[in-house]
Amino acid sequence: MTSRQNKTLRDRLTGAACLVTGGAQGIGWAVARLLAEHGATVHVCDISRSDIEAVRSTASPGSLHFEQVDVTDRHALEAWISASHSHHGRVDVLVNNAAYSRWVDDADMSDDDIERTMRTSFDAMVHATRAVIPLMLAGGGGQIITMGSLAGSVYVRGPAAAYAAAKAAAEAYSQILRLELACTPVDVTLVRPGAVAGTNFFRHVSSRRMSRLSDLFPAATPEQVARSIAESLVRPRPVVNVPAYVPYVAAFHALAPEKLRRLVELSGESRRDYSMARDRRIGRRELR
């Protein structure tokens, strides 16, 4: 970002009240930290007490507030949103980041895992979104940012079927909701990342679930995704793709899905360790 854009971001966020679900590690924590660094008061919820305690010790006092919440518990989620709103009298930004998945073949997933995937990645997003819309409208506007995935629009072997379905549902919901709110002061943005390295996700998921073809492209980092979200706060847009190759892969799939699937199958398993954030050379623009 240029210095002028940085100033605009600080102007956008100074005094703003922001909510981030699943915000105590990975992308969520990178986003929460960036928002707080630019003047926002950020309310973070996460299911993991240990993750919350780990980041709380590094957080600047006053700008970040943490709460342990299971977003699949609708009443607990809505109570957290209500309490955060009461603290400020407004909600300016909601980042729907919480997700869950076991990346295994469908036959190896339990019914509970499939339901939890959908309840965390889709149901909770819907409940949080519907809870904040009237608050944003009453406060004069706001922005809802939902984490999608390339897996939600490109269907190849690797991602769990339930995970891809949840992300596809989140993408469709966000796209239609944006049209419905077009004449209001509430913006809706879908973030569509490709592979993101350096999060807890691939500490629980084998990198071999990824295609060797994916190794040819740079993986995003949580910080890069956070910077892309920051840009969408300065200039709202319907979809944020990160890294830049994501829309080209989606277009290839739309035009020749069987060819892409064949390429993925022929390339074999990934050799990269996606639990490590190695591609920090990408998008190293600093925000101040």
Image (spheres, grey):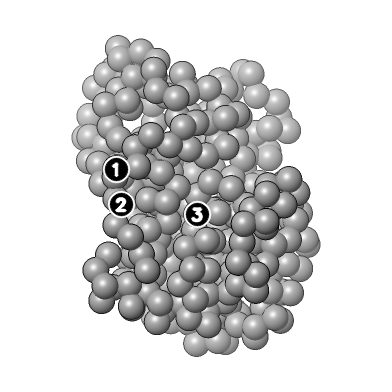
Mark 3 burial class by Cα count in 10 Å: few <14, some 14-19, many 20+ = some
Residue at 50% x, 49% y: name it: 27
Left or right: residue 173 versus residue 56 is left
Q: Which mark is residue 30?
A: 3
Q: Earlier in the sequence, mark 3 or mark 2?
A: 3
User: Which image quarter: residue 131?
Assistant: bottom right
Mark 1 burial class by Cα count in 10 Å: few <14, some 14-19, many 20+ = few
Amino acid type assigned to the residue bearing label 2 in the image:
Arg
Amino acid type assigned to the residue bearing label 1 in the image:
Arg
User: Which image quarter: residue 82?
Assistant: bottom right
The quadrant of the picture occupied by the N terminus is bottom left
Q: CA distance from mark 2 to mark 1?
A: 6 Å
Residue at 55% x, 86% y: name it: 139
Q: Are marks 2 and 1 in contact (CB under 8 Å)?
A: yes
User: What residue is shown with label 2?
Assistant: 284
- Who is closer to the viewer here, 228 or 150? 228
Please state the total of marks drawn on the protein image.
3
Residue 37, compared with residue 190, is above or below; it is: below
Residue at 44% x, 25% y: name it: 273
User: What residue is shown with label 1?
Assistant: 281
Classify mark 3: helix, strand or loop: helix
Q: Earlier in the sequence, mark 3 or mark 1?
A: 3
Q: Is residue 129 visible?
A: no
- Who is closer to the viewer here, 15 or 57? 57
Q: Position of residue 135 (x, y in %)?
A: 60, 80
Q: Position of residue 278 (x, y in %)?
A: 38, 34
Q: Position of residue 219 (x, y in %)?
A: 35, 36
